[in-house]
Structures are given as structure tokens and as C-alpha cells.
Amino acid sequence: MTDIAVVGAGVAGLGAAYALREADAAVTVFERRETVGGRAATRRRDGCVYDVGANYCKDDDPRVADLISGELADGLVEAEGPVWTFDADGEIAEGRGDDARKWTYRDGLATLGERLREASDATVRTGTEVTGLAREDGGWRLAVEAAGDATPPQAGEFAGETNPAAADAFEADAVVLTPPAPATAYLLDRADWDGADESLREDLVEAAADVPYRTILTVALHYPDRTDLPYYALVNADKDHDLGWVAREECKPGHVPDGESLLVVQPSPEWSRHRYDDADDEIAVAAADRTAELLGDPDRYEFDWADVVRWRDALPDAGADRDVLDRGAASDLFFAGDWVAGEGRVHAALRSGLAAGERVAETL
Ligand SMILES: Cc1cc2nc3c(=O)[nH]c(=O)nc-3n(C[C@H](O)[C@H](O)[C@H](O)COP(=O)(O)OP(=O)(O)OC[C@H]3O[C@@H](n4cnc5c(N)ncnc54)[C@H](O)[C@@H]3O)c2cc1C
């Protein structure tokens, strides 16, 4: 039987595994984190469930919408209420003409990863990082290690050594790479690809390394009381405010106990980059202050707990050169992810994963 290795258990990697579920292949997914879902991430605290990466998945892509509302629908809920806008002066205005459904799950959007994992027939090895790739005898040899807590490499940081003795080997006939573009570039840059067209490896590294990313902090602010408001979330339309997004997690069924409030605040990429290395409590206080000012609500200065999540490579601002990535197929190397789709969205990443899985299936 053919062995397929998928690197990354975000929705793209799990989408690829799902598309291969009926193929005559053994699919193994490697995920460096202990949980699946990647940037479709959820945390829990004191009876609250809150989405700290993607806030929801839209029903924009018909294929993905059918899959989520069909086979993966168990526990699916919608964020209730419209998205309003605000501008650089903090002026709030009604609506942004966006009628798409905003899906999450009662247990949070990370459930989408769990549902995909259940629906695929793949072996998913969480807590396992792929640290090396080598082309051998017409297949691929992966170096896999128990993941440490090292942060993933950033664009431009390709140096670094792995101790090969510490890594296990995994042989695969084909590989699907789904880490964010900087981490994919890092793996390819160090790939041992003797005998291959060296310019292809270099072109692939460049295609992935060229993708620009936005940094975003997520600040969850919990309040013991709730104010009724006419919207689910506010988005900064002119991209000139310190805050980019303020969402009321209580608008998602099952996420926040009655009477309490949990705001998911995402400051602008500039603010997030500037504050990235600050202490969590400083970030939380500064974000709460800006939020209270924006909402004109003095009670929002006084949160009772907060949680800060740092996403250095949060959203790709452009897609990679698809023609270059497609050339990998001749060497049994495939790519998927939001940066491959050219859109930093859950539905686009999942669609990209399904497409990559189908391409691999065609080669079997
Ligand atoms: C703050 C924030 C807000 C967002 N808001 C929205 C939103 O509201 N709606 C929306 O649709 N989208 C939103 N997005 C974007 C959405 O989350 C992403 O586009 C989507 O989740 C990307 O999925 P992916 O599978 O391509 O990548 P990822 O989810 O990043 O998955 C890649 C996986 O690969 C793993 N990995 C990396 N390197 C290795 C390695 N060497 N070995 C093993 N595993 C590895 C990573 O741990 C990760 O789990 C948001 C993103 C962020 C960060």
C-alpha cells in the first residue's frame, strides 16, 4: 500500500487526509502541537469556550459548506448577530453587507479539526514535529521528533541544525506539506534532495519564503456582566485604528455562561507587532482600555481575567506562486494551506487541503 505523509493537522492537512480517506493508501498526519485544528484554535476557562485564532468559518465555498453542514455538522452552531464597522476615529456604523453564515461549534472552532480527523481514515500523530525531509529511492524520508515548545521559524530564518540521531525516520511515497509558508520554506531549505533538479528546490523555497504575513495578537477579556448590544462583532473598516476586531463570544451558543461576557479582541497588525514581546497583563490592560474607549463603556476597563495568544504568522497577505508549487508533484511533493489558496480563511485552507488530497489520489 502507498504511504502518504501529511505535515500539519490544521484544516488544510486534515482536509487532505479526508480527501484520501477512500484511497488505497495509508495516510499519516504529523502535527507538532498536542491538538489538531491549527489556527482554527479554541481555549476553555471557567465554563467559557472561546475561539482564539479564526473566529468562525464562513459558508462562502459551496464544497466546503456542504461538507461542514453535512458530514461534519455535529455540534455546529452559528455566531448570532451582524458584524458592524468602526473607523479610525472609533465611529461605529451599522452593517457591512455581509450575509454569510459564520460557523463555529458549540465546543469551539477547533472541533472542525476533530470532526475532520474522525471522518478521515488517517493516523494522526500529535506532538510530533517533522524536522527533516530527504528524497530517497523515489520516495521521501521524514525525520520526526517529539515536539519541543520551540516557536516555528519565521520568514528568512532558515539556518539551524537538527541532531539526526534524535529523530525517528518515516518513509513515505508522497508528502503533503501544509505548515504556514515560513515553516514550509524552512523545511524545504534544509531538505536533502540529492539528484533532484536543484533549481526546483530553490524555486519552491523562494515561492514559500516570499509569502508576506500579518502578525496578530488575540486578547480574550472576560467580564462578570454583560451588556446587550445589537451586533456580534465590530471590524475596523479603514484599517487605521489600534484595534482590528472586537467580537462578543457570548453570541456563539454554548460559549459563555448566561449573564457573563467574553470579548475576543484582535488589535491591528501594527499594534500587535509593536506589543508582541510585552507581558500578557500589559497587553491585556492596553487592549481592554482601547476596547472600553471604542465601546464607550467604562465597565469594559474592568475585566476579571484575560488570555493572550500570539500569532506571529497569523494571516498570509498573498498567495504563493501556484505554478512553482505544482512542479513539486513530479517529485511526489504537494502543498496545501491558506497561503497556497492565497486567502487567509478557514474555508480556503480546507478547500486547498481537499484539492491537494484529490491530486495525490489521482497519482495512486
Ligand atoms: C488571529 C486569527 C484570526 C483569524 N480569523 C479568521 C476568521 O475569522 N475566519 C477565517 O475563515 N479565518 C480566520 N483566520 C485564518 C484561519 O485561521 C487560517 O487561514 C486557517 O486556519 C489556516 O489553516 P491551515 O491548515 O492552512 O494552517 P494552520 O492552521 O496553521 O495549520 C498548519 C499546522 O501545521 C503544524 N506544523 C507546522 N510545522 C510543522 C512541522 N514541522 N511538523 C508538524 N506540524 C507542523 C502547525 O502546528 C499547524 O497546526 C484567522 C487566523 C488568525 C491567526
Image (spheres, rainbow, N blue to C red):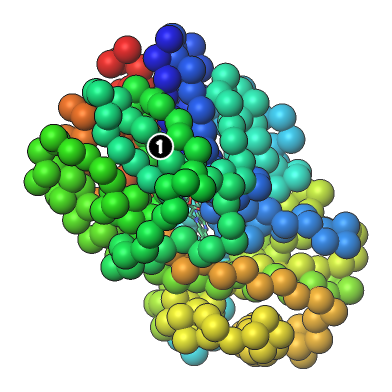
Q: Position of residue 163 (x, y in %)?
A: 44, 53
Q: Position of residue 323 (x, y in %)?
A: 15, 40
* Label 1 beta carbon less than 8 Å to ligand 1: no
Dot 1 crowding, Cα within 10 Å, few <14, some 14–19, many 20+: many
Q: Position of residue 44 (x, y in %)?
A: 78, 57
Q: Is 255 on the left or on the right of 270, as rendered? A: right
Q: Position of residue 42 (x, y in %)?
A: 68, 53
**Image point 61% across, 41% down: which residue?**
126
**Image point 51% across, 64% down: which residue?**
151
Q: Is 241 on the left or on the right of 44, as rendered? A: left
Residue at the front extreme, as displayed: 165
Q: Which of 72/89 is in front?
A: 72
Seen in the picture, residue 37 relative to 222 is either above or below; the reply is above
For the N terminus, give its image quadrant: top left
From this viewpoint, is residue 156 visible? yes
Q: Secondary structure at mark 1?
A: strand
**Image point 71% across, 85% down: which residue?**
281
Q: Which of 343/86 is in front?
A: 343
Give, as a three-letter code, the residue at label 1: Leu
Tag 1 residue: 142
From this viewpoint, is residue 228 visible? no
Q: Which of 161/221 is in front?
A: 161
Corner quadrant of residue 309: bottom right
